[in-house]
Amino acid sequence: MSSTKVPATDIWQALRAATPARIGLGRTGDALPLRAVLDLQLDHARARDAVHAPLDVAKLAAELAPLTVVHVRSTAPDRPTYLRRPDLGRRLAEATPLPDGQVCDVLFVIGDGLSASGVQARAAALVEACIAQLPELTIGPVVIARQARVALADEIGERLRARVTVMVIGERPGLSVADSLGMYMTFAPRVGRADSERNCISNIHDAGGLSAAQAAQTLGWLLRESLRRQLSGVDLKDDQVQLPSSSSLPLEGPP
Amino acid sequence: MLADTPLSQFLTETPIPYEADEVTRLIIDSHASAAFAPIAHLTVGGLRDWLMAADGAAIRAVSRGLTPEMVAAVSKLMRNQDLIAVAAKVQVVTAFRTTIGLPGRLSTRLQPNHPADDARGIATAVFDGLLHGVGDAVIGVNPASDSIAAAANLLTMLDDLRQGYEVPTQSCVLTHVTNTIALIERGAPVDLVFQSVAGSETANRGFGIDLAVLREAHQAGLSLGRGTVGQNVMYFETGQGAALSANAHHGVDQQTMEARSYGVARVFDPLLVNTVVGFIGPEYLYDGKQIIRAGLEDHFCGKLLGLPMGCDVCYTNHAEADQDDMDSLMTLLTVAGCNFLICVPGGDDVMLSYQSLSYHDALYLRATLGRRAAPEFEEWLDRMGMLEPDGGVRALTDPTSPLERRMALESAR
């Protein structure tokens, strides 16, 4: 069949507003029209770039100024190893120097996770919005961590004597949104904490996700409750906070 | 060494101790020794040769005598070709409003997910799928929210839509099994009871379930009696790595753990079981080659254990895979007689952020491999003027076509 059959009067035009899904693409024979094929390939390439792009830590640190910044990396030496070995992304590289500091209420860790481009685009503004919500709390230095998984913040928080850590991390990129961030809050961080002991705020992005302001507000509530009740995780779940649950299978969720 | 291991050894030496795990107890206690008799003398290697030579009826006859560990073990000795050839001989037929798994048929799950569970957005994706002849296995939504009220609204919308167009299929909102029990109690139109399952007691606890709650849910689903041509009411999803990611694998390899999840599923006579093969990520299945291999292993193991096995042929953006790998796997699985595949608009799931098959992929498989939709659904396609004589699905491009116009008006409301 030679002609591409796109519905004559495009009845889908009005319907596209109802969903970001790729509906009403038309057919050529039984196949997707070439345009739809190429669109998907381009979006896939962008999502792959988001996964593999390195984080420009100097640029991020400059954006965070005048906040004090500490640089660390996990034991995963490179991206391919990081993707294969989540366990290596959860531990600090050997002999990582960390400053001797005072006990702090909250320690922010910014990890590249699975979308360095998301971190590059919005992590600094998000952390600043969060800190602005917490005038009464002491905030530790902002740690920038490369090849990081969520649980890396446990070791960092334990060594820096934080009462609560907040890992701000790039989420697994989708085709429509490749630069989404998540925040994972853990009370009394220490190596070996289970994921059920964390609270998560996910889908922080500009394309219909949570705004930085909304996420910061939710985090503020969670942090105060966590410090008041001396815990985090499933026991802190509250009906006031609608945390999105995303899937029927575990995503090894945190990147 | 694996090839020389006697099958009978799997009945006395369990990888996860009988005392410690209810899944092991289920596997051992439900083992049918009469069904096992014809193969009781074999080694794992001997079983491979037996399977290659046996016909489908003989394989089905020993199904309840096989344990998940035996099946996982033999699959490790089999090439992709063997996994396809043996699975293609085994038919597992189940039914609710459609009959799924008949020879020469391929069914599809229509997966119309929306990031905010918007009812109109989901309905739009359903219409698009129906116009491609997709949805005869189930119209199944993964909800973004965990809310029972939201699930009830979606179930009502899907049921209204199904009845309004008299579509012979079943719907499902893939929420936690305890939510579905609550939905049944408050009278929501539940067709299928969904749950993700894994291969150990601890992994299932990570999902918030045990065998007792699955039994309760199965009975609750059966009590509704909503099926017309059958009463298989359960829908399970699985995937290699689920137990390992929860550190609930007891040191057992991920493929054996996956087969053990089929040991859980099969006691509940499910309508549908599918592995979500590339979903969990590259730490479990690194690239297209591993995903393809795992998809064929899972389908083979499920079929051998008597399950109506389907597959979500999919990958994430951090895996070394692309659409070409999906093309290969869906083609191989269809040749292997897979009961159903999952399809989303344009291959892009905008809620779960991964790529699955597109509605068009189903059209390709029907045309190229000559597979038809479930008979009840195919009759409906014919009534709607969408069925080609060869089982293909006609492209509706005439704006005066009644179905397309009606759907457009309906979804624009």
Image (cartoon, helix red, strand yellow):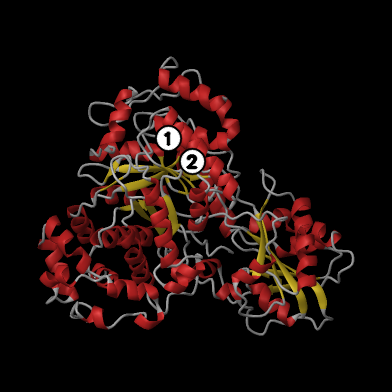
Percent coordinates x, y for residue A254 in the rendering: 59, 64
Residue tagged by mark 2?
Answer: B112
Asked which secondary structure carries label 1, the reply is helix
Quadrant in the picture for residue B273: bottom left
B115 or A150, nearer to the observer: B115
- Report the quarter where the C terminus of chain B lies: top right
On the rendered structure, is A77 left or right of A204? left
Asked which secondary structure carries label 2, the reply is loop
Percent coordinates x, y for residue B165 in the rendering: 41, 27
Q: Are marks 2 and 1 on the same chain?
A: yes
Q: Disc 2: which chain?
A: B
**In this view, A94 is above or below B216:** below
Near mark 2 (Cα within 10 A), the count class, few <14, some 14-19 or many ≥20, is many
**In this view, A120 is above or below A190:** above
Labelled pair 2, 1 in contact (Cβ < 8 Å): yes
**In this view, A8 is above or below B79:** above
Which residue ends up furthest to the right in the rendered image?
Answer: A136
Residue tagged by mark 1?
Answer: B129
Residue, x 42% and y 60% (percent of image)? B216
Near mark 1 (Cα within 10 A), the count class, few <14, some 14-19 or many ≥20, is many
Percent coordinates x, y for residue B258 in the rendering: 36, 66
Percent coordinates x, y for residue A35 in the rendering: 48, 33
Upstream in sequence: badge 2 or badge 1: 2
B13 or B345, nearer to the observer: B13
Name the residue type under label 2.
Pro
On the rendered structure, is A43 left or right of B394? right
Quadrant in the picture for residue B350: top right
Residue, x 46% and y 18% (percent of image)? A8
Q: Tell me if I can see residue A33 in this picture.
A: no
On the rendered structure, is B328 left or right of B186? left
Q: Tell me if I can see residue A88 in this picture.
A: yes
Q: Disc 1: which chain?
A: B
